[in-house]
Amino acid sequence: MKKEILLTGIKPTGEPHLGNYIGAIRPSLEIAQKSNFLSYLFVADYHSLTSLSDSKEIQESIRCVAATWLACGLNPKKTVFYCQSDVPELFELNWILSCITPKGLMNRAHSYKAKLDQNKEMGRKDMDDGVNVGLYSYPVLMAADILLFSANQVPVGEDQTQHLEMTRDIAQKFNRIYKKDLLTIPKALFQKEKIVLGLDGRKMSKSYQNYIPLFCDNKRLRKLVMKIKTDSSPPGEPKSVKDCLVFGIYKHFANNQEVSELEKEYQKGISWGEAKERLFEKLERFFKDKKNIYEHYRNNFSEVDKILQEGKEKARDVAIPFLKEIKKWIGIND
Ligand code: TRP
């Protein structure tokens, strides 16, 4: 049976949080484990250069995110785990794709348009103020990431759906121009109901500073859990689990029985302090072993580096011959 090819990129942007775990890490790893899938997971370090320029911060983020995925169960024997910057073939393909990508397509990218809107709002004269070419052509590099490995299943969050659509457009255009179905048209794997709300009820996100980190000490964890917004109903008054942020997080980490038990406690009027204490304990237990593995990797980064090096070899074993084939077909000497 032909294997499905799963691929996703992880942008290293600092401390990973519960939203990342529920929305991206756990579902991607679940699929990666399936026997009919060949999976590629990579750290999109070159993508992060569009917004980061502190070398120490970049280095720290890359290792932090790699350690996180390993601690959460990524099996490097089963999944090809590598750094984008370690696969130079991607950047050759990036150029090839750039030359067939209509500029107008990039003009429509949400991430670019958001910058324009921001500039307009601030009353700036130059609509492109603060926009680098990397940010502008970000979707082309993302297309190269996906197409070089002939991935057909790409797990994406809502914010990346449009980018994937662009990858499909670019691949179709390439195949049309060069009259051969060389590039595989990828599909988005949607992750339903995986949005996690943060402490203040908005989507959990680093930019809102409303997140709970995956691996922090218990003191900080408790403090954050206690900060989750609730209504002001007193102890003893029945509470609804619907729209409750505390319950909303709890249910992602508990089994069915535990969920219905807590639901009963809500009906009986559990106090918010107690409900939060339950959530704290749940999170503490759920992440305990993962946290130990994470700490281990943080203290032994050379092990992480070694795993990424092995991933690099495996990724290039696929990337090198495929790029050769593409170049030959389009008439570029290799
Ligand atoms: N753009 C993605 C993000 O910001 C990261 C990414 C880069 C990616 N290349 C990719 C995701 C290829 C899926 C496939 O999260």
Image (cartoon, rainbow, N blue to C red):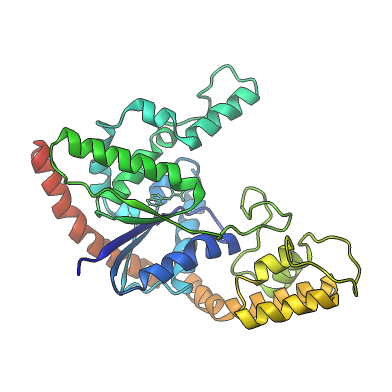
Which residue extends farthest top? Answer: 125
Q: State which quadrant residue 171 falls in.
A: top left
Residue located at (38% from left, 35% from top):
137
Where is residue 310 shown, x and y percent of the image?
A: 28, 68
Query: Is 207 above or below relative to 34?
Result: above
Residue located at (53% from left, 77% from top):
290
Q: Quadrant of the C terminus?
A: top left
Q: Quadrant of the N terminus?
A: bottom left
Where is residue 322 shown, x and y percent of the image?
A: 16, 52
Foreground of the two, 291 or 146? 146
Residue located at (37% from left, 26% from top):
104
Query: Is 182 above or below relative to 177?
Result: below
Q: State which quadrant residue 319 falls in.
A: bottom left
On screen, residue 142 versus residue 3, left or right, reads right
On screen, residue 86 versus residue 55, left or right, reads left
On screen, residue 132 versus residue 222, left or right, reads left
Where is residue 58 shown, x and y percent of the image?
A: 47, 52
Total numbered labels:
0
On screen, residue 182 versus residue 241, left or right, reads left
Residue located at (62% from left, 77% from top):
254
Asked if one can make out residue 307 in the rendered structure from this viewpoint, the answer is yes
Asked if one can make out residue 334 in the rendered structure from this viewpoint, the answer is no
Query: Is 243 above or below relative to 117?
Result: below
Where is residue 231 shown, x and y percent of the image?
A: 84, 60
Foreground of the two, 259 or 201? 259
